[in-house]
Amino acid sequence: MNPDDALARLASLHGILTEFKDMAGVTHRTLPETQRALLRANGLDVGSPKDVQDEVRRHEEGKAQAIVRGDLVIRTNQKTSVSIAQPAQWEVLGETDGAILAEGRAEDCIDLPVLPDGVHTIRLKSLTHAQEVALVVAPSRTPSVSERTELEKVWGVTCAFYGLRSDASNSLADFDDLAAFARILGAKGAAFLGINPLHALGEAATDTISPYSPVHRGFLNTDHIALDHAVPPPIQNETINYVAHRRHHSTELRKAYSAFLASADDASRRAFEVFRQQGGVWLRDFARYEAISAKFGSDARKWPSSIAESKGQSPDQLEYAMWAQWLADKQLSTAQQTARSSGMTLGLYLDLAVGARLGGAESWGKRSAMAEGVSLGAPPDHLSPAGQNWQLAGFSPRRLKASSYEAFRLVLRQNMRHAGVLRIDHALGLSRSFWVPEDGSPGGYIRQDFQVLMAIIAIEARRAGTVIVGEDLGLVPDGFRKEMAARGLYGYSVWQYEKDARGKLLPPNQLRAQSLACFGTHDTPTLEGYWQACDIAWWQKLGWIDTKEAARATDKRAGEKRQLAQVPAPNPLPNRAGAGVRDSVHADLASSPAALVAVQLDDVLCLEDAQNLPGTVDEHPNWRRMYPKTLSEIETGPDLKKTAEIMAQSNRTATSHRGKT
């Protein structure tokens, strides 16, 4: 086998796609340099042609010796037979304590009894070979909307949480503001309140502002902790000054910690100790990262090589980081309890980012299952014609498998703790991930173990009672949506992208029933921005499209606007979408078969500017805008009242709230 053939063979064995098509239908072949970079990122030695040959040999020898082929997925409460390649002794070890759940000897088929759900281990031993694989016992489906709400169709509001304005504060929103807005929406008959990710950004990362660029997705952003008697600095020009907020907030949070140490009651101390014990090694590792990053910076790739095993962090630093996580978790729990008690049938709709920052806490340490030397991204698509490099670490299929998927399970479990609904950002990554090598090689796709990951999602969602929405936008693999739906996940129907074969917007009655339907997201233009073609103007300004392409896109947009406003040519379109088009669009969404309908607060308030422009960092004021109205003004104003009335008219409001606005 020549070196190129061996490299291609190894790439194929480890799930690297030989080619892919972009948004325009152009086929991109995965070049040898990309194959090599992706294999290296997945933990394989490909430094020389001999190394590649050796890796191929080891893989094929292991496959030939295997008693079973890879990790197993079976259904909860169902007896199952598993074929084996050779006679073997076997035993199933439980996920929590390693207790033997079942055992026996089989010649060609293992007859497994009914087993509890979980990621167990099946240990096998033949005359010549021993093997351990994960045995994932999972429910057939994740929880449904009707199970959780006793309603077939519900509605809710999504917003940029950081931009909410309470009446008492004019700075970054806190968890008290979240609870207050949930209470308002519950009284209006909404079933859920959707917000941007709440993941930890890292205390040392003072200039990080994107909620989709966290340091660790298993822990919370302490910037949102509500502090008594702490007066935050005012915002500047209607945008958030994150550096000023963090400087002030960190000082006040340290004071609150000192007060806790000095005067906390016994119940609070016990609650913190329980939280710390339950957090275990993952919480302690995160606290260590926070403590080390305070001295050496937020990018662990730049730390001294000796620091990884250092135990020299101050106990007070570690305790403080864990205490801050406890306080954030406690306040988020209160916000979810408030949402539910206000009448929301689902409560908080949280968002799981696609990955964590390169060099952050999630990709640091011996328990990390992240790929190295690559970033997650996307080839050119409708969200960003130039393609994207997100500067985020993604799971290495090989490392994740070797660790029994522990890191993935932690992230899911932590994000479902206080979520009635969880949105999985870029759910396509559960099937295949687009990796952009740091060495400058072109990007390429690598397959993830889709069936195993979906089964684990089902386990964690059932345990938490959380409805799952998979954001399935972009270049969707064949069969992906069908498989996701079969597992009970809800798709993501963003109406401005839902089009037929001719490129026309789908009628609302053709939107998917098993989906969350919305007009737009934080990554798309608002309804008013769509009307004014703000996104097209930005694309041209940034050089992503030329003048002719912008003109074609604007002409196409005019036709879509006529569909939305139901204004046939040559009748003039309104200059602005305003409340009239907004109410028409919301009524159409409400009448659709979609189980969940989300309206953006930005659209309720008829705002023009988007929260984010994908593919930019500082060119566009991403993640900085405050809402122009306070929570009280939103509550008493006509806009939310009208939206609630529209949803009630389509029977999306729980009986106890119908007609109450």
Image (cartoon, helix red, strand yellow):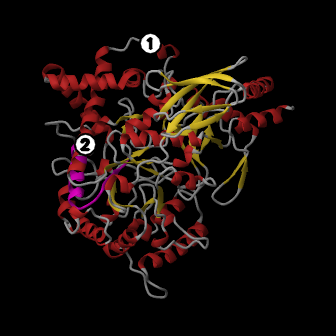
User: Which of marks 1 and 2 precedes in the sequence?
Assistant: 2
Q: In which quadrant is the C terminus drawn?
A: bottom left
Q: Amino acid at mark 2?
A: Phe
Instruction: Count residues near mark 1 (Cα–Cα under 10 Å), then give few for <14, some for 14-19, many for 20+.
Output: few
**Tag 2 and tag 1, C-beta contact below 8 Å:** no
Give the x, y percent position of residue 435.
61, 40
Q: Which residues are magenta?
A: 174-196
Q: Residue furthest right?
A: 1
Is residue 461 positioned above or below 291 on the image? below
Pointer 2 residue: 175
Secondary structure at numbered mark 2: helix
Magenta stretch encompasses residue 304: no
Which residue has dot 1 on it?
Answer: 310
> Residue 83, which numbered label?
none
Q: Residue at x 70, y 24 (%)?
A: 87
Among the 4 quarters of the image, the one containing residue 246: top left
- The residues bearing labels 2 and 1 have C-alpha atoms spaced at a distance of 34 Å
> Is residue 190 one of those drawn in magenta?
yes
State the residue at coordinates (19%, 66%): 660
Q: Residues within 10 Å of mark 2 (few under 14, many from 20)?
A: many
Instruction: Say which element carries label 1.
Output: loop
Percent position of residue 544, x then y: 57, 58
Q: Is residue 22 left or right of residue 581?
A: right
Residue 167 screen position, x and y as percent:
16, 51
